[in-house]
Image (spheres, rainbow, N blue to C red):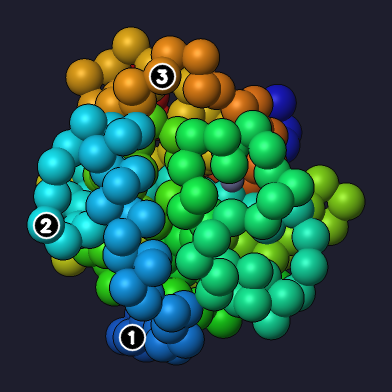
Amino acid sequence: MVFSILLGLGFLFTSIDGLVKDDPIVIIKKYISYDKKRQELSLEYLKKRHGLIKLVPTIDPKIIVLHYTAGGTLESNFRYFNKAEIEEGRAVIRDQSNLNVSSHYLIDRDGKIYQLMDDNMFARHVIGLNYCAIGIENVGSKEAPLTDKQIIANIQLVKHLKNKFPAIEYLIGHSEYLQFREHSLWKETNKKYITYKSDPGDVFLQKVRLGLMELNLKSKP
Ligand SMILES: [Zn+2]
């Protein structure tokens, strides 16, 4: 354990040194459609699932949730998120809302960061917390663990977001979201609506957190 942490630290020091300090973060805008249908379904989700009545589907970011896509490529995932309505096959989550899943960012395996929507817009990516959560998806899966370049990109992006939104207090992996069930931030009207997640992977999370220690983001309630 100590050895792996040391290895992780070694990795970070070499990799972060590789980053040019005054190199600004590069974010490529590649927006999914936020059309009338997505807006309507987002407002409906905010009302039905979170119990929040809003005129515009915006969020106040307090938490960042890291994910992996569980497969596909940058383009196939973009096409998937671009649809406003959830596919028929995902019955468990479709039962709760027709809004499709999406996220604010999608990071490719080469570390390139794509922004899919404005930071303060509503996206469905984590039960109970969507109304205050920014989602970062990474192209990868259990079989294709996230790359070192993705680790560096996630560190850079979280720093950028914390700087932009000082109210962000938490950084979690999707696999950790259930810890918030009894927390005051949790808003889900159906107690039985739960899914079990293993993304984005423990090693990835450990390394991202090592690179963000100075921010003091909390990992649990
Ligand atoms: Zn996820």
Q: Residue at x 31, y 65 (%)?
A: 39
Residue at image position (61%, 62%) is 138
Q: From this view, report whether residue 1 is shown above or below residue 173.
A: above
- 10 Å crowding of disc 1: few (<14), some (14-19), many (20+): few
Residue 67 place in picture, x, y as percent: 57, 50
Of helix, strand and loop, which one carries label 3?
loop
SS type, badge 1: loop
Measure how far apart labels 2 and 1 are at the Cα level.
Answer: 35 Å
Name the residue beneath numbered marker 3: 190
The three-letter code of the residue at mark 3 reads Asn
* Picture layout, residue 30 above or below residue 136: below
Callout 2: CB less than 8 Å from ligand 1: no
Labels 2, 1: front one? 2
Residue denoted by label 2 = 55
Left or right position of 58 against 127: left
Number of residues whose C-alpha sits closer than 10 Å to that of mark 2, classed few (under 14), some (14–19) or many (20 or more):
few
Q: Nearer the viewer, residue 80 or 14?
A: 80
Dots 2, 1 in contact, CB < 8 A: no
* Residue drawn where x is 88% and y is 51% of the image: 143
Q: Residue at x 24, y 39 (%)?
A: 47
What type is the residue that disc 2 sits on? Leu
Q: Quadrant of the C terminus?
A: top left
Q: Which mark is residue 204?
A: none
Q: Can residue 80 be seen from the camera position used here?
A: yes
Q: Picture quarter containing residue 41?
A: bottom left
Can you give x and y, in whole percent of width and height, for residue 120 in the image?
A: 22, 63
114 and 111: which is toward the camera: 114
Mark 1 sits on what residue?
24
33 is higher (above) or lower (below) than 190: below
